[in-house]
Amino acid sequence: MKVVDHIKKAAGKTLFSFEILPPLKGQNIQSIFDHIDPLMEFQPPFIDVTYHREEYVYKELSGGLLQKKVVRKRPGTVGICAAIQNKYEVDAVPHILCGGFTREDTENFLIDLDFLGIDNVLALRGDAVKNETYFSAEKEGHTYAKDLVKQIVGLNKGEYLDDELLNKSKTNFCIGVAGYPEKHMEAPSLDQDVLRLKEKVDAGACYVVTQMFFDNQKYFEFVDKCRKAGITVPIIPGLKPLATKKQLSILPHRFHVDLPDELTLEVLKCKSKEEVRQVGVEWCIKQSKELIKGGAPVLHYYSMGKSDNIQKIAGELF
């Protein structure tokens, strides 16, 4: 079932969902099941699976020369999605990127998903390659997420890259895109970023999932700006419980989000890792309750490979 159909079926009740990372290469899928199992009691209608683009590493050869190698540290997105749908009978939402994909790679990826009965995708530009400052597209790839959305919409209409194909079947993907309540790091302003989001929705995106935030007012103001800009699709808040003191600096640096002083000061008072995790859980529960009261269609949690704190939060809400 499509994400937007799950939301319609809920008839105003806030749903629970979460996002998982593929395991590092060399691990098996049981680590994914161990992560998902404790959260299934809260009946998520869908689970997101991230996609991690290639990285470049340089291996020193004899003679001092460096050999450039392409590595993928977390492969398996498509296989994990198939396994989730088979084992848990819930919808899987694979992430698909502009970065590292040509248009043909994208088409083949989507065909695989369609054959597996996967109805939803989250279309993202993706980050720059590790150790590079700016994003650059593949020679035959997409530079912007709106163009990726257009290709998916085209495939939904039976438009393939090869015009000479006969008996072309149509796909039927529900397309999600990312939104940024505190603006994308490359956007000159929040207003301009909302305009870019509207371009993605106008291109065919069906719903929006936001970047994590820790101040609910940022989300509510963002939704208000989107509605005034003519964006009418569901806007799902993305949440992450803070888990370590290091994240006080890591999260603002990596995701360009602000942490409220009240949360920061409470974390700094903590004497142990356990105390920090509890503060993070309590803050996220507080956020979640307010978002449910404010009519959020889904609460979408970024688990970052850990499910115990998400389990505590969901246990208070769902």
Image (cartoon, grey):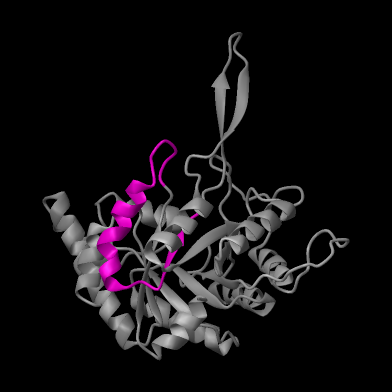
Front position in the image: 148 or 106 = 106
Give me the residue at 36% from left, 79% from top. 15
Q: Position of residue 12 (x, y in %)?
A: 38, 90
Up the image or down, 286 lies above or below 27; here it is below
Name the residue located 57 percent from the left edge and 55 percent from the top edge.
126
Say whether residue 311 is left or right of residue 163.
left
Rendering coords of residue 236 (x, y %): 44, 76
Q: Toward the viewer: 289 or 122?
A: 122
Q: Look at the image and give the residue range highlighted in magenta.
A: 23-50
194 shown above or below 28? below
Q: Residue at x 43, y 49 (%)?
A: 22
Which quadrant of the figure contains the C terminus?
A: bottom left
Label count reads: 0
192 vs 312, left or right, is right
Residue 189 horizontal side relative to residue 39, left or right: right
115 in relation to 11, above or below? above
Q: Looking at this view, name the residue that lies furthest to the top.
A: 63
Q: Residue 152's image quarter?
A: bottom right
Nearest the eye: 91 or 198: 91
Q: Quadrant of residue 62?
A: top right
- Residue furthest out toward the right: 164
Q: Is residue 133 visible?
A: yes
Position in image of residue 164 (x %, y %): 88, 61
x, y (%) of residue 154?
Answer: 74, 70
| Residue under the image location 71 percent in, 48 percent down | 138
